[in-house]
Amino acid sequence: MKRTAPVYVCFLLSLFIGTGCRKAHDTYRPGKYAMEISQKTYGTLPDGRHVILFHLMNANGMQADIINYGGILVSLKTPNRKGHLGDVVLGFDDLESYLHDPPYFGALIGRYGNRIARGRFTLEGKEYSLAVNNNGHHLHGGLKGFDKQLWNAEPIQTDNAVGVKLSLLSPHGDEGYPGNLDCHVTYLLTNEDELRIVYRALTDRPTVVNLTHHSYFNLTECQRDILDHELTIGADRYTPVDEGLIPLGTLESVSGTPLDFRESTPIGSRIDNDDIQLLRGRGYDHNFVLNNRDGSPAQAALVYEPQTGRTMEVLTSEPGLQFYSGNFLDGTLTGKNGIVYGHRWGFCLEAQHFPDSPNQPAFPSVVLHPGEKYAQTTVYRFSVMK
Ligand code: BGC
């Protein structure tokens, strides 16, 4: 009798709420949950330090898992149009896999998101030389960027959000950058179904900063490639690149090119066009110059996945958005739940300043002086279209 009682109760409950015996947290139920935040040890680094995983759930059941190694978003569960919650970011099941240099899955990127040509720049008359890690260029912070650092972390809760506040002190000379950089990044999962990322940094010497977040999204719950996702980007212009994906320095119109996403367009519809920019990127790997920027978070992009009905809106305070269509994924990585990540299995929308800005005086400045505060906010907002 004791053993059958839970089954019986579950059966009655399933009749009542119509969700079968699925655990409650697999189902999106607006306003029906108490927000949750819990933490556990996720793994141990080779030097013995423990990595913590924070599990966040909002009042609707949407969930995010974040680890303090690299500030990596390990999992993000959002509803499909049937109210089923499924994971929409690429990643791994264990810490070990994240240590083997994956292509920045879910990570925080610093000190500089994107490329700096030859890893060199001059600031206030002084030349700096950074670690180079991408065909002779500096990419995503160098050999040991913020994606490979263990951040200090504390859980936070507000009236309408649960979150994690991550802190890192990057010392003067880190990967070649000047200045001690005191960084704070807060992830908030709000009851408006947003993953909100707030970045702050201070320096004690003039330096350059461009932080971003590098999730690979796949709104099909990572079941197939991302080519059917329909994308809108609010950008009339982009920064064309050379063979090394370094900006030429010009801003060019997207009009009449496969980079025109001003109207919602399937990612796959033009990706293999014979276009010099697409050939250089092996697909989309370009920085879009966002329209209507005044430094406060404004809409930058919208993605719709027709089979599941999921939509994701991106809002940011930043002037640029790197759209990367996962061109370098090639089936050699196996991710969560044994899913093999094939070509173009995830896409990134990285809110940022433009690539190579330290060498491009005409681009918006990325220089941070002592006494100034680096601030950026980016929001990934989820909903469904019936
Ligand atoms: C870059 C790609 C690069 C990828 C690495 C993206 O942000 O734009 O060129 O290959 O990161 O995963």
Image (cartoon, rainbow, N blue to C red):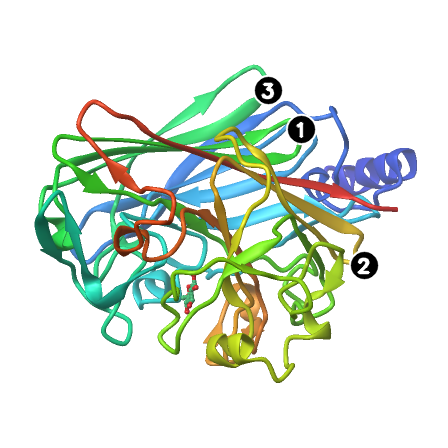
Q: Quadrant of ligand 1?
A: bottom left
The amino acid type of the residue labelled 3 equals Asn
Residue 89 in view: no
Query: Earlier along the polypeptide chain: callout 3 or callout 2?
Result: 3
**Quarter residue 183 falls in:** top left
Q: CA distance from mark 1 to mark 2?
A: 22 Å
Q: Is mark 2 within 8 Å of ligand 1?
A: no
The location of residue 246, given as percent across then percent down, is 36, 67
Compared to 207, does 143 lie above or below?
below
Residue type for callout 1: Glu
Dot 1 and dot 3 residues touching (CB under 8 Å) = yes
| Most foreground residue, 63 or 318 | 318
Residue placed under numbered mark 1 in the picture: 192
How dense is the environment of label 1, judged by Cα within 10 Å: few (below 14), some, or many (20 and up)? some
Q: Amino acid at mark 2?
A: Pro
The Cα–Cα distance between marks 1 and 3, rounded to whole angstroms, is 8 Å
The N terminus, quarter of image: top right
Residue beneath disc 3: 160
Instruction: Classify 10 Å Cα crowding around label 3: few (below 14), some (14-19), many (20 and above).
Output: few
How far from the left and from the top, in percent, is residue 137? 25, 68
> Looking at mark 3, is its residue's CB closer than 8 Å to ligand 1?
no
- Left or right of 83, for residue 171: left
